Structures are given as structure tokens and as C-alpha cells.
């Protein structure tokens, strides 16, 4: 069909069509709906994931889930807290020889000086229904058992031909933009002929969910994950709930040796679980089996015209490190606030160019960190100079840097990260966490972002209030001043706010809705209104009115 023909029958018109109802797709939908944009989500499966898959939410992800209004639900669905330590063992079996231990103590897991958000430990099969309910509650629509047959785009939108699998009915959906969150094998990415780069396929696995009484896997205040190097197999064993009753087990198989997923019958999997647990009489109840490929791939571009890649469609990362699911949620948030800004007229279309510019380098950091973990824990034979070094887990989680037209950088420092425990407040990095008090109530600077653009200023920054009001009115952009110190400002009990943010008492730091610093100035300009208007127009791709 010709998508640029208005005479073509269109059954649905939506601002954003999201293909895929995994973590990336549902996050995008939820965050869009939170901003008043009601997307349509299409998913070829009959429901959300029944497999644990991605596990754990780092503080950055929890910061964003707070904005989505689901952080408390995700914490309630978790089987661990920030008070738990994480022990990773590379071993022969559950009680067998231990080759290497990686202990992340409670202190190691404590990011409270960098973020007010806790860690979550919910599995994907628990998180997706939470995101789904919230997205639908906010106005998104989700169609399961629905397959995208074709996608075409033109200068004004995207047209998708859609198949309702139970009825065989074909319909046409027209959208302003399309988000491809359709997984690591993304049919849409392939249709767009977007190449990928990276290490590629690493190994093939059978993932198993089983129930058995293995209470030793769930010790008080300790989460233990086993990477198993057994003479019979290579795999992973860990608990996926707080009771010690439900577990995940993966075993690697080798197609190059003639092995196939079909050879791993339930009987064989039970035998392997018994070997892994050193329990020859164990009678595990297998609840789910899924074959999957571990890989390290990144799309060369995250955008083609009006189509954007998110989650595994944009990059496939080894699960060693728990970064893939977190990156998917963060992709969804980044896309949502930018698409909403463009669709509501708050930003020009150039803002969307910042999606690839900002998220692709983060994908490189995530994949490299996860690949380094994979080699250390599961494939030491791959160690060598061709394996990229990790920038450091803490830096990848909270110290990543954005560079794009939506950031007005003040230096040409090429470093892609900084130490999140020693933040600089520079444009391109997360706004630093500083504890404040609002009428006696403790609040973090990071609790304040999420909807409006924020202008943080010090005790002498009164002039920024009037400037922000005028600029907000002229541009139609929600813009709020947060003054710290002074008679009308929030209390700064540590007295370090202006130092940490790198501004003087009358300076300003402009923080985007995603909590990233877009611009800052150490002092107050002669005309704060003109300065702020110019800055916002530049980062939002707007003409100065």
C-alpha cells in the first residue's frame, strides 16, 4: 500500500505506535501516557512475559519508576532490598568447589550518597504487569496477540499493517511516530536494514523456571547467584523469589557440536538441576522452559526517520550484570519525554535527534560492562585485548554522560563517565543528589524532577523566578525555579548545594525532565530572562519568539 495516500483506509490514528510490550515498550507507553500522550502498544504474544528474564532495578531506574508512579509496587514485588548483600559465586555446583567469589557487601550496594532511590530486585515477569496496569490506567492501549505485518513511513507519519492473530483480521494503524521495542531479533530493525556491531553471538542457552525447596539459596540479608562451571555443563543457578521456592536455571548448549534445544527434554533438565544442586533425589517442578541466545550487539543507529529503536531492538547485552532491563526502561523514559515534548509543541523535531546521540553511547557502556562480566564469570577462555574494558559498574549506572544538541556542554572533556559519588554538576551528567528540607520534610534534589524543566538556583537567585515565569509563558514549556537557601528557598542542611552544582549564590543550573543537567551558569547574567530564553530554545530546537 502507499502510505502517503490519504485515500488509503486507516482504522486507527495514534500519536505514537509502540511495537512490543516488554520492558522497553511498556515503559515507553507508561511514560508517554504520564505526559498526556496516549499510545497504542502492539504485542505478538498473548500476554506479558512468564519468564523472570531481566532481574533487578538499579537506583537510576528506580528514580524513573518513581516518576511513573510504580516504584513502590516494584519494590513490593522485589525479593531483595538495599539492605541485602549480593554474593556471586563461580563454582562447580551449589555445594561444590568454588573457583571465584564476588561479594558485593551492603556497603557496596549502598548508593544513598549518589541517589535517594533504593535498589529493586523484581524479576521481569513481575515488573511487566505493573507497567502494563499503570500504562492502561493512564490511557495507553495495549493489544496482545497482534502482529505487525508491514511498516512504511513518509514525511508526516508511519503506517503499520496489523494482524489480529486470533481472527486473522488485518487493519491499518497510522501514527506520527513508531517505537520499535520488538526484541533482540527486531523484525522492524531488519526491515529498516539497520546493521549492528559488536561481538555478536556469544552462546546459546536453555532457560528453566523450576520450583524446589532450596532455602540455602535465600539466606537472610543475602542474595546469592551461582555461575556454574561443571564438567557436565556451563550454566547459572539462582533464586527468583524471597521464599527459596522458585528458581532460575540456565544451561549452555552448543549448536556447533550438533546440540539443539530440542535435546533438552524435561527429564534431562531435571538431571542437570540435580547435578547443579548436589541433590540427586531432588524432584524439581519445571514451570517454564525457553531457549535463547546470549549476544552483544548494538544497532548502528537508533533512529530512521520517524521510527526509533528501544530496548533489545537497539542493543542486545549479556545478562551478566543485570543491565539490559534497566537500559530498556531508561530508553523508554528518554523517548517518552522527548516525543511528548515534540508532539505537544514544546520542542522542535530536532530534539529527537538527541535520542541516538545520547542513548547509543550509554548502550556501548552497558554492553561493554556486561561483556566483561560474562568473560569473567562464564567464558574466561575469551579473555584478551579484543574484549572492551568496563568503565566501572558505578560509573555505568549513575555516572554516564550525554552529549547532544539538547545539552549545552561547557567543556570538551572526552571522558564518557564520571564518578557518581563525586559529581561535578556539569551539563550532560545527572543532576547531583543533595539532601534538602522543605518545611521540615527531607527531600532530595532528585525528587523534584520528572515533569517540569527545573532551574536550580542559590540563595541570591531571586531574579530567576520572574525570568522562568516569563520564559515559560512565551514558550509554553513548564518551567519551575527551585531556590535553595535564602528566605524563600529550601533549606540546605549540608551547606553544599551551590558547591556540588557548580554555581554561585546567584547562578543557575537547568535540569531537564530526565534529571540531566542541560546548562548551568555560575553567576547571574545581566538579563536572566533573555539568557534563559536563548538556552531553552537552543536545547529544545525552538526559534526565539
Image (cartoon, rainbow, N blue to C red):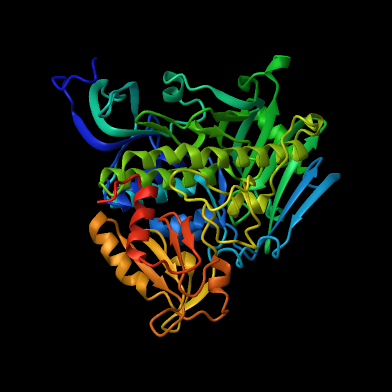
Question: How many labels were placed on the picture?
Answer: 0
Residue in view at x 40 percent, y 85 percent = 487
Q: Residue furthest left?
A: 7
Q: Position of residue 222 (x, y in %)?
A: 69, 60
Q: Quadrant of residue 254?
A: top right
Q: Position of residue 126 (x, y in %)?
A: 48, 49
Q: Position of residue 247 (x, y in %)?
A: 62, 45
Q: Position of residue 132 (x, y in %)?
A: 37, 46
Q: Quarter holding the N terminus?
A: top left
Residue in view at x 34 percent, y 43 percent = 339
- Can you say whether 529 is above or below 280 in the image? below
- Whether residue 283 is visible here, answered yes or no, is no
Residue in view at x 58 percent, y 28 percent = 291
Q: Residue furthest front?
A: 526
- Whether residue 121 is visible here, answered yes or no, is yes
- Can you say whether 212 is above or below 474 in the image? above
Does residue 252 appear left or right of residue 458 in this picture?
A: right
Q: Quadrant of residue 449?
A: bottom left
> In front here: 314 or 105?
314
> In front here: 16 or 408?
408
- Can you say whether 347 is above or below 44 in the image? below
Residue in view at x 47 percent, y 81 percent = 491
> In front here: 324 or 241?
324
- Can you say whether 480 is above or below 187 in the image? below
> In front here: 459 or 193?
459
Amino acid at each position: 500500500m502507499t502510505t502517503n495516500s490519504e485515500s488509503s483506509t486507516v482504522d486507527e490514528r495514534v500519536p505514537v505506535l509502540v511495537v512490543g510490550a516488554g520492558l522497553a515498550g511498556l515503559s515507553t507507553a507508561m511514560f508517554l501516557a504520564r505526559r498526556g500522550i496516549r499510545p497504542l502498544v502492539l504485542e505478538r504474544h498473548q500476554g506479558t512475559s512468564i519468564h523472570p528474564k531481566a532481574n533487578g532495578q538499579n537506583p537510576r531506574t528506580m528514580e524513573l519508576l518513581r516518576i511513573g508512579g510504580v516504584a513502590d509496587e516494584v519494590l513490593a514485588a522485589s525479593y531483595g532490598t538495599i539492605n541485602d548483600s549480593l554474593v556471586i559465586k563461580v563454582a562447580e555446583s551449589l555445594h561444590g568447589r568454588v573457583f571465584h567469589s564476588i561479594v558485593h557487601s551492603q556497603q557496596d550496594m549502598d548508593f544513598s550518597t549518589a541517589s535517594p532511590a533504593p535498589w529493586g530486585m523484581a524479576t521481569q515477569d513481575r515488573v511487566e504487569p505493573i507497567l502494563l496496569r499503570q500504562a492502561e490506567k493512564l490511557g495507553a492501549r495495549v493489544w496482545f496477540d497482534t502482529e505487525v505485518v508491514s511498516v512504511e513511513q513518509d514525511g508526516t507519519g508511519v503506517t503499520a499493517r496489523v494482524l489480529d492473530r486470533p481472527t486473522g483480521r488485518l487493519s491499518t494503524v497510522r501514527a506520527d511516530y513508531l517505537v520499535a521495542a520488538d526484541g533482540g531479533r527486531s523484525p522492524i530493525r531488519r526491515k529498516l536494514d539497520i546493521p549492528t556491531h559488536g561481538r555478536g553471538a556469544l552462546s546459546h542457552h536453555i532457560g528453566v523456571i523450576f520450583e524446589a525447596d532450596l532455602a540455602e539459596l535465600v539466606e537472610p540479608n543475602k542474595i546469592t547467584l551461582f555461575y556454574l562451571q561443571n564438567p557436565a555443563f556451563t550454566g547459572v543457578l539462582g533464586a527468583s523469589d524471597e521464599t527459596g521456592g522458585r528458581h532460575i536455571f540456565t544451561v549452555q548448549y552448543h549448536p556447533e557440536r550438533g546440540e539443539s534445544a530440542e535435546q533438552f527434554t524435561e527429564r534431562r533438565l531435571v538431571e542437570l538441576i540435580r547435578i547443579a544442586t548436589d541433590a540427586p533425589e531432588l524432584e524439581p517442578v519445571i514451570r517454564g522452559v525457553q531457549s535463547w541466545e546470549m549476544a552483544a550487539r548494538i544497532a548502528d543507529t537508533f533512529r530512521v526517520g520517524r521510527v526509533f529503536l528501544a530496548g533489545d531492538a537497539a542493543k542486545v547485552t549479556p545478562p551478566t550484570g543485570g543491565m539490559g532491563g534497566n537500559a530498556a526502561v531508561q530508553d523508554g523514559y528518554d523517548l517518552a519525554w522527548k516525543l511528548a515534548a515534540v508532539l505537544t509543541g514544546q520542542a522542535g523535531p530536532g530534539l529527537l535527534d538527541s535520542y541516538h546521540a545520547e542513548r547509543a553511547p550509554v548502550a556501548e557502556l552497558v554492553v561493554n560492562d556486561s561483556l566483561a562480566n560474562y568473560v569473567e564469570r562464564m567464558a574466561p577462555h575469551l579473555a584478551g585485548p579484543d574484549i572492551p574494558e568496563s568503565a566501572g559498574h558505578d560509573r555505568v549506572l549513575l555516572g554516564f554522560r550525554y552529549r547532544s544538541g539538547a545539552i549545552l556542554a561547557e567543556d570538551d572533556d572526552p571522558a564518557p563517565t564520571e564518578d557518581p559519588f563525586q559529581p561535578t554538576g556539569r551539563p550532560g551528567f545527572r543532576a547531583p543528589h543533595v539532601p534538602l528540607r522543605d518545611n521540615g520534610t527531607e527531600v532530595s534534589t532528585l525528587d523534584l524532577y520528572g515533569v517540569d524543566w527545573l532551574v536550580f538556583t542559590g540563595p541570591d537567585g531571586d531574579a530567576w523566578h520572574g525570568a522562568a515565569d516569563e520564559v515559560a509563558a512565551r514558550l509554553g514549556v513548564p518551567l519551575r525555579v527551585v531556590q535553595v537557601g535564602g528566605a524563600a528557598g529550601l533549606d540546605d542542611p549540608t551547606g553544599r548545594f551551590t558547591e556540588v552544582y557548580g554555581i554561585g549564590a546567584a547562578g543557575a543550573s537547568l535540569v531537564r525532565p530526565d534529571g540531566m543537567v542541560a546548562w548551568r551558569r555560575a553567576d547571574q547574567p545581566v538579563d536572566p530572562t533573555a539568557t534563559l530564553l536563548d538556552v531553552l530554545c537552543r536545547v529544545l530546537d525552538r526559534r526565539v519568539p
